[in-house]
Image (cartoon, rainbow, N blue to C red):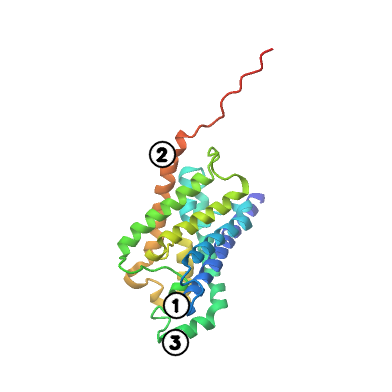
Amino acid sequence: MLKNRQFLGELISECIAVMIIVLIGDSVAAMYTLYDPSPYKLSYWGVSIVWGLGVTIAIYVTGSVSGTHANPAVSVALALYRGFSWRKVPAYCAAQVLGGVLGAALVYTLYQPVIDHYNQLHGISRADGGAAGVFFTHPGEFITPLHAFMDETILTALLVGGIFAITCEYNTVAPQANSSALIIGLLVASIGACSGYLEAWAINPARDFGPRLFCFLAGWGSSALPSADNFWWVPIAGPLLGGVIGAGCYQFLIRPFIPRHASAVLPPVP
């Protein structure tokens, strides 16, 4: 009974973590997309920082319960390399996607009148993809779905490899204790700042698919799923593959060479 209660708490924690990330991140995307002039148009770094702080806040809120995977790519990598139970992975991923749906619903509740005004002003509808960029990702200029898949693989490898390094018990150079949450947030912000215009840096299947599923049900229809050029699979498959690669690079190329123990202390001479 106690184990079931703890597992339920972990799933609730994962759901809330992604909900927080999407609520904060998609809200700043709404500020960037829907307003003209936008306070972020000439200061894109601010968008990246807010997304990163959303991750940091989610970790501080939920980390003591589930460890705040908040990303199926992280859950899969932890199961593959660090002993997280494979039996928990499907439920964790489902809870994370649900968190994405709930986060998108909250953003929609906040911005629905602004979304409708934006679409009316620009003569587009939700079915045409109007304001969809608030909620989920799509390829930027000159980016094909296959190129986006490669991008997402590389960027998520950087993310998950970085998370493995930051949280490695042997890595004494990494930030210790509670400061790791802030560094992970800065890692997310840095990835967004250097590559966000490629395809809006999903790097997290739940962060993209949860809001995409919400939008499919809320009137965006096929512009959300399967989306133009069937793009929906890219922010799922790319991050999952990238997470495995990035974590594997850390586990096999860096971690084996970290000293496990401090130098032996010689006993005092009598």
Up the image or down, 18 lies above or below 177; here it is below
Pointer 1: what residue? 131
Identify the residue at horizontal 47%, vertical 67% (top origin): 44
Under mark 3, the amino acid is Leu
Under mark 2, the amino acid is Leu
Pointer 3: what residue? 121
Element on which disc 3 rests? helix
Looking at marks 3 and 2 on the same chain, the residue that comes earlier in the sequence is marked by 3
Element on which disc 2 rests? helix
Looking at marks 2 and 1 on the same chain, the residue that comes earlier in the sequence is marked by 1
- Badge 1, how many Cα within 10 Å: few under 14, some, many 20+? many
Q: CA distance from mark 3 to mark 1?
A: 11 Å
Looking at marks 3 and 1 on the same chain, the residue that comes earlier in the sequence is marked by 3
Q: CA distance from mark 2 to mark 1?
A: 42 Å
Give how far across and how far down residue 182 sits, in percent: 57, 54
Q: Residue furthest front?
A: 42
Q: Which mark is residue 264?
A: none
Identify the residue at horizontal 52%, vertical 46% (top origin): 166
Q: Residue furthest right?
A: 270
Identify the residue at horizontal 42%, vertical 79% (top origin): 130
Under mark 1, the amino acid is Ala
Give how far across and how far down residue 212 sits, in percent: 45, 70
Q: Nearer the viewer, mark 3 or mark 1?
A: 3
Element on which disc 1 rests? loop
Pointer 2: what residue? 253
Give how far across and how far down residue 232 sits, in percent: 38, 67
Q: How many marks?
A: 3
Examine the rendering and report whether any part of residue 11 can be seen. no
> Residue 175: which quarter of the image?
top right
Give how far across and how far down residue 13 sits, in percent: 60, 58
Identify the residue at horizontal 44%, vertical 57% (top origin): 191
